[in-house]
Image (tube, rainbow, N blue to C red):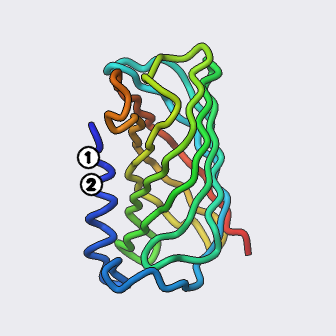
Amino acid sequence: MDGLYAVFFLVSTLISSENPLINGLKKTEAIGYNKVSFAKVEFQNKFVGNEIQYSYYIDHKLGPLQPTYSISITDAEGFWAGGGFIRKARITENLNFNFDFSPGIYLKNNEEDLGGWLMFRSGVELEYKVNHNWHISLGYDHRSSGDIWKYNPGMETLKFSISKNIK
């Protein structure tokens, strides 16, 4: 994917109908929430394992961007932790198309070698609002170094997530 999702993320912030990035990073309220994701890990077009991820979304936005922090671990003990932003694009009252981007620290342990310790994670997600407090989603993300390391094969995850609002 070589950063295609990061480009989607950037474009979505620039063309946001509610609050485009060009209008600045004015702080506004947002619904904070916790999310747990269960994923299949893909490397070199083969599913090679599983991953669990926890994400925390802050209760405000900066322009169209909601800050997020996330950690994940795979069944091969690959660890990633980072922070970034999510951009939610409302499709209907109960359906969002989300774009996210987060730089983070990567420790491969027994997992595939991605070339270095700094990895950027970007993805897309279709999110459904089950009720006022709960959401489910399907997402796909890519992580790689953005070619800052000589070796940069990248890794993808196909994930199912459950989210609960904080308030």
Instruction: Return the residue found at the far top.
Output: 110
Q: Nearer the viewer, residue 35 or 28?
A: 28
Q: Secondary structure at mark 1?
A: helix
Circle 1/circle 2 CB separation < 8 Å? yes
- Position of 143 relative to 68 (above/below): above
Residue 19 % position (x, y) = 37, 84
Q: Residue at x 35, y 21 (%)?
A: 151
Q: Residue at x 52, y 69 (%)?
A: 66
Residue 132 % position (x, y) = 63, 74
Position of the C terminus by quadrant:
bottom right
From the image, tell me which residue sits under label 1: 4
Label 2 crowd (10 A; few <14 / some 14-19 / many >=20): some
Q: Amino acid at mark 2?
A: Val
Q: Amino acid at mark 1?
A: Leu
Q: Nearer the viewer, residue 12 or 159?
A: 12
Q: Secondary structure at mark 2?
A: helix
Residue 11 % position (x, y) = 26, 65
From the image, tell me which residue sits under label 2: 7
Res 110 quadrant in image: top right
Q: Residue at x 52, y 44 (%)?
A: 160
